[in-house]
Image (cartoon, rainbow, N blue to C red):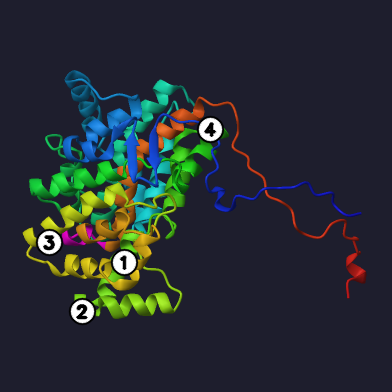
Amino acid sequence: MPIQKSKVELRKGLKDVHFDRTKTAFIDGKKGTLLYRGFNIHDLAEKSTFEETSYLLLYGSLPTRSELDKFDTELRSGRELPDDILRIIHEIKHAHPMDVLRTSVSAMSSLDHDVLNMSKDAVLKKGVRLIASVPSIVAAHHRIRNGDLPINPNPTLPHAANFLSMLFGIKPNMEDSRLVDKDFILHAEHGVNASTFAARVAASTSADYYSTITAAISVLKGIKHGGAAEGVINMTQAIGSEENAPQYVEQVIANGGRIMGFGHPVYKAVDPRSLHLKAEAEKLAHRKNEPRWFSILQAVTETEALKKRAKLGINPNVDFWAGAIYSLLGIPDDLFVPLFAIGRMPGWTAHVVEQYSKRDILRPRLEYVGEPDLLYVPIEKRG
């Protein structure tokens, strides 16, 4: 008996499907606009700090001086990793940094005696703790895998500067610290991207907070989501010099390949975040006296093939310039995605809090197009 099919409108990739309302972020892809809680990303990138932006995303408004001081104190006091987590990192030190981060965050749940408390206040408290400790996990693992001792968090340093200090074992240049701080701000939130959607799906089932963030980290690891910055650096190394850029781009396109760091599922105008990182990448390249990386990337954007694509709304995204910045700062390629996760922690947490306040489980459907009512044949008669 044939299956009675109703007319189904497919939105592959759930493109332009709105499943709920949010107060967390607004994106206008046609105009290239990004707002966090109503505040333009340009203002936040130039005037705010990651700590202040995190407070904004978590609590819905810009903090007063006393509120920010209290929040900053909570972040600084939450940086130190429990011994159990350090032992886990030692045990799996040869794994990919994203696998170590995912496993460590998941294990953090076993140390929370209030793990099943999903009230808003409780989840925000857990969120602040993880925002503080995720950089420590990334830095500790990097040092342990290289045979070095982890560096204790420095309570006198801001969030970004402390991460660089723990990673490299020296007090960081403050210009570098401010640049990483800006990068974290630009990555802090971006609507319902794949990893955020995963976190919200988990939250919609009333999974605990650590499970939602573990889900987000797992999805972020995918090269189609978080791996673009690393892909850009691999591309830059393959090109070698700016003179080779036109031939490289033409060859990749002719073979049906993808130019890493170009295009975005939402933006048809220029990704507003990329404007800040492009300017910072150029300044950093000159400051480090290593202009080659920026020159190669700039040459890629100026090829005729990509100029034509820009007219179709395919422009450099935030990851196109982020990879160059990370490399110039001496950050290993396989830490690029963990850096993305460090920045995105407040955004993920804000969405999880929002989703916990909803009643509906996120449960989309698939249209079945297989065979109907097949006859079951006993195994003895199957050829």
- 3D distance between C-alphas at marks 2 and 1: 17 Å
Task: Give SS at disc 4.
Answer: loop
Q: Are marks 4 and 3 in contact (CB under 8 Å)?
A: no
- In the image, residue 228 sits, relative to residue 167, either above or below, namely below
Tell me the residue that label 3 is attached to.
Answer: 285
Q: Is residue 129 left or right of residue 373?
A: left
Give the amino acid at mark 1.
Answer: Lys
Mark 2 = which residue?
A: 243
Dot 4, crowdedness within 10 Å: few (<14), some or many (≥20)?
A: few
Q: Earlier in the sequence, mark 3 or mark 2?
A: 2
Segment tinted magenta in the rendering: 326-332
Amino acid on which the number 2 mark rests in the picture: Glu
Q: What residue appears at the point 92 percent right and 70 percent down from the top-left corner?
A: 381
Q: CA distance from mark 3 to mark 2?
A: 18 Å
Find out whether the residues at labels 4 and 1 contact each other: C-beta distance under 8 Å: no
Mark 1 lies on residue: 307
> Would you call the spot at circle 2 few (<14 residues within 10 Å), some (14-19), or many (20 or more)?
few
The spot of residue 370 in percent (x, y) is 77, 59
At x 22% / y 52%, what residue is drawn? Answer: 277
Going from N to C along the chain, the mark reached first, 2 or 1, is: 2
Q: Is residue 232 magenta?
A: no
The residue identified by callout 4 is 20
3D distance between C-alphas at marks 4 and 3? 43 Å
Which tag is nearer the camera, tag 3 or tag 2?
2
**Circles 3, 2 touching at the beta carbon (< 8 Å):** no
